[in-house]
Amino acid sequence: MNGVRRWALLGLTSSVVAVSVAPSHLSAQEARRRWERMCQIRQEKFDLVLPKALADNDLDMWIVVMREGLLDPLWEALGRGYVGDWAYYVFTARGARAERAALGISGYMLERCGVYDHFGAADELRSYVEARDPERIGVNIAPSIGGADGLSHSSYLHLKEVLGPVYGVRLVSAERFVSDFRSTRTAIELATFAEAGEMSREIAERALSNEVITPGVTMLEDVAWWMWDQLLERGLESSFGMPSVYITGPSGIEATSSDRIIQRGDLLMIDWGVGFLDFYTDMKRVAYVLREGETEAPQGLQHAFRQALRARDVMKAAIRPAPTAQEALDRVWAALEAEGFRRVAFNQPSDDPDVTDVVIGPHSVGNWGHGIGPSLAFFNPTRLTYELRPGTLISVELFAYTANPEWGGAKVRIPLEDDGVVTERGVEWLYPVNSRILLIR
């Protein structure tokens, strides 16, 4: 079929699917069920997590400032709501329970959720704060964590002016507090994240199958757009934008989500995540396109994949709660090296054919694809200093480089990534994780 005509038909089919299928899945009752679950999550976060997070970070009050067109990254988590000119969410430490107020914020879903004690006008803020006389007021200013850095410069100046000379000088960064509040999980949060994980792995594994891919016909971007259609159909969001659907060869990544046509003998990967009810996953999958006459992936690729699985098993067992994430990371590297794996810089494997080189980046996950909790990843240095607590959601990510005789000895980069929860027993998975090379016939 002519390539332009085939692309046009694909686009037409996608449009029909998005229009005709979505309403059947996203009925009014489904919308209500999702809202009710978010309300339950907020209720338990405010009741069970917020008071301790305030106390642990020595905060008497937390003020989140928003204005129309400039919503804080935590707007969804705190209840959404309509924001007119200036608006504030205000949380006050009150021992075992934190007091909650929404000033200048309104709306059916926010008010009916029932998690706020007081709704008032924005111009009440100063008198509200004065009546509670907080010594330390946390605000969303964060040098290291974008998700905790929602207070703009003009909003900061506005807040200081509104609070006046007494309370305007009591503002402090709430960076560590926001990390603690977001990354300390309740049971319903873990259940919801697990559901998001199941949806993301199901879509990824269907994408790397003959349901979507016809060797010699399908382009990498066709697969990525099919995945986007699945998000539209289910009312989901993407963790990172366009799904990364890519081909890896002896010289590394050859093409990503492009017009490159998938051919027999290709080694395919997907790196992506879905957003569901303010939770975002991060995962990878691997597939091989069988050549004519083949019934399984070549032995060299299978061996490389097994080596990656072995490294992941070591990581899964070694990641345990620790006073700092750095201490947990040091334990993981010690365990990997004891098993014969070699630490290398990203995409810089050694020439030693007898050793599998590894790069690891176990990072926080949850409310963004790259979360804001304690992290064992080299690219989150501040969060390496945070306590790694039981219940932390983490993405167990690694890249294993193993020599492949079928590629003239070049090392195959096998990426593995799935999401789990940190426990005293190690990481425990929240959905079925990657355990095989998927086959495309």
Image: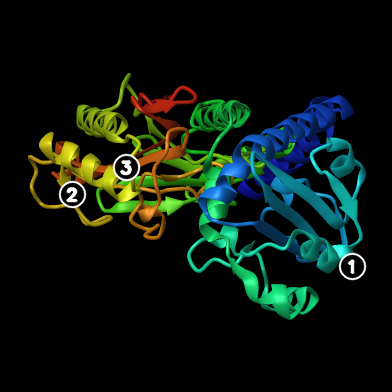
Q: What kind of element bears circle 3?
A: strand
Residue 4 vertical placement versus 214 (above, below): below
Q: Can residue 277 be seen from the camera position used here?
A: no
Number of other residues with Cα within 10 Å of mark 3, as a class: few under 14, some 14 to 19, many 20 or more = many
Residue position for label 1: 123
Q: Residue at x 72, y 80 (%)?
A: 165
Q: Residue at x 19, y 42 (%)?
A: 407
Number of other residues with Cα within 10 Å of mark 1, as a class: few under 14, some 14 to 19, many 20 or more = some
Q: Residue at x 84, y 36 (%)?
A: 114
Image-based side of 208 in relation to 69, left or right: left
Estimate the spatial distance between the alpha carbons at disc 3 and disc 2, rounded to whole Å: 11 Å
Residue position for label 2: 343
Percent position of residue 142, x then y: 54, 66
Quadrant assignment for the C terminus: top left
First of labels 3, 1 by sequence position: 1
Q: Nearer the viewer, residue 336 or 41?
A: 41
Percent position of residue 389, x then y: 42, 38
First of labels 3, 2 by sequence position: 2
- Tell me the kind of residue under disc 3: Leu
Residue 70 vertical placement versus 153 (above, below): above
Number of other residues with Cα within 10 Å of mark 2, as a class: few under 14, some 14 to 19, many 20 or more = some
- Tell me the kind of residue under disc 1: Asp
Residue position for label 3: 398
- Tell me the kind of residue under disc 2: Arg
Q: Nearer the viewer, mark 3 or mark 1?
A: 1
